[in-house]
Amino acid sequence: MLYDNLDTTGGRLIFAGADTVALAEKYGTPLYLMDEEKIRANCRAYRTALDACVCPGSSAIYASKACSFAGIYKIIAEEGLGADVVSAGEIYTAKKAGFPMERAYFQGNNKTDADIRFAIDAGVGYFVCDNFEEIDALDRIAEEAGIKQKILIRVTPGIDPHTYAAVATGKVDSKFGIAVETGQALEAARLAVSKKNLVFEGIHCHVGSMVFDSDVFIRAADVMLGLMAEIKNKLGHELKILDLGGGYGVGYYDGQGKIDIPANIRAVAEHVGEAAKRLGIETPSLRLEPGRSIVADAGITLYTVGSVKKITGYKNYVSIDGGMTDNPRYALYQSKYTVVTANKTDAKDTITADLVGRCCESGDIVQPEVSFPADIARGDTVAVLTTGAYNYSMASNYNRIPRPPIVMISNGADRLAVKRESLDDLILNDII
Ligand code: LLP
């Protein structure tokens, strides 16, 4: 199967050692399942490679936009990673979960004054400043708070990762960061150096997501190191952190390709070490910000089939009790997924049908042209694989559909990590 935490012996889908059909019965559907061991193993792959690499003091920061809920911050904290947070909501969740906030990096292209105050109060370790206005505002608010705030500056190295447009963020014309090519990144550095209440420690970039080619990171690193050297030579300011963002891809279907993350980290770090020497700057400590590659293969979603519609001479639909509200990624990006009929994995005869959700919208497709058992019927359990990233975190209440719960599986034992939203939760803020 796609990943080593999946098994279909006995005609049923086993995930992380647990029987998915039994879990669907126990907790109801739709249901997100997460494999704690897999999350931890993914964290360790980064941590071990970064600890051993030639850039001293390097570390991984989990991009929590990929999947944010209290329990995940606890796991990340235990595994020694930092957390990339992008909103007061993520900061609040991390803090409530007891995350060591000095390991938090606050990202985002529009942090309001209120966000900045909130993050400073929460003790966020680093701000990743996206623009000139933020550098000014942060300096002013840090002074009011009587602190010196550590920062990185987010820049765009002008690298196109050639994945998909919605996630290509490192290009010169991106809404994120400050362009190196135009000289504006150096100007932002000059501004940061002049600020008394900011401690300017490094630069950051994030070229995009679903990157399978380490050359993308190496090219980005070259531009970034060039900027670090320029900052040293022109401003007399030596930086110690090089944050190359996240973006390592994961396989959503067989044959999509695999990436050896530890080998890639080694290659990138060695390149950085050599290039730094050549440029006459100190070898920076690296930060990587994986989101998807920490949680994607640690998650699957279970649904119950409600109807099988065969439009004679046209096409077939299998409707499930979830859809674009719990997984908007096909609707947004035409993302591919692997779909398994969890209670009939041995089926020989098949039919092809679109797997569609229950929303009042034709675009509510979870996956087109899926192969199902020929006898697929109401009541069957369907699993969509590799849904641990950007599913729960992008879920909505469109059509007033409550968000599903998350059940964490650890050594074969299941526990509720996030409760199912209730109808009362849906009207919590409505004035009646
Ligand atoms: N760092 C920064 C600054 C980012 O903006 C992101 C992702 C990451 C790290 C983590 O990237 P990853 O390792 O997960 O590729 N909703 C889209 C993905 C948007 C990613 C946004 N930024 C999707 O479902 O594919």
Image (tube, rainbow, N blue to C red):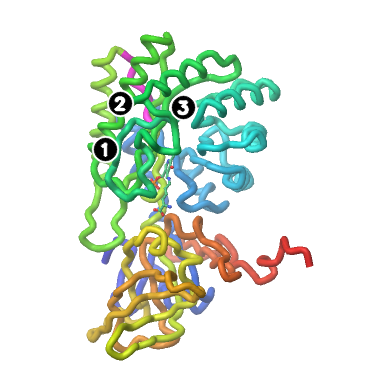
Q: Would you say the beta carbon of the disc 1 residue lies within 8 angstroms of ligand 1?
A: no
Residue 243 visible (yes or no): yes
Q: Is residue 3 above or below residue 165?
A: below
Residue ID at (61%, 67%): 421
Relative to 39, does residue 262 appear above or below in the rendering?
A: above
Residue 284 belongs to magenta span: yes
The answer to whether the residues at label 3 and label 1 have Cβ atoms under 8 Å apart is no
The magenta segment is 281-286
Q: Residue at x 42, y 55 (%)?
A: 389
Query: In the displayed structure, does residue 228 sit left or right of residue 395?
Result: left
Residue type pointed to by label 2: Val
Tell me if 80 is positioned left or right of 285 in this view. Answer: right
Q: Residue at x 42, y 23 (%)?
A: 185
Q: Quadrant of residue 1?
A: bottom left
Which residue position is annotated with label 3? 153
Q: Nearer the viewer, residue 387 or 22?
A: 387
SS at circle 2: helix
Camera-side residue of 347 and 337 = 337
Judging by the rendered image, the residue that carries numbered circle 2 is: 223
Q: In the picture, residue 236 is in which quadrant?
A: top left
What residue sits 49% from the left and 65% below the top? Answer: 326
Give percent across and percent down for residue 130: 49, 32
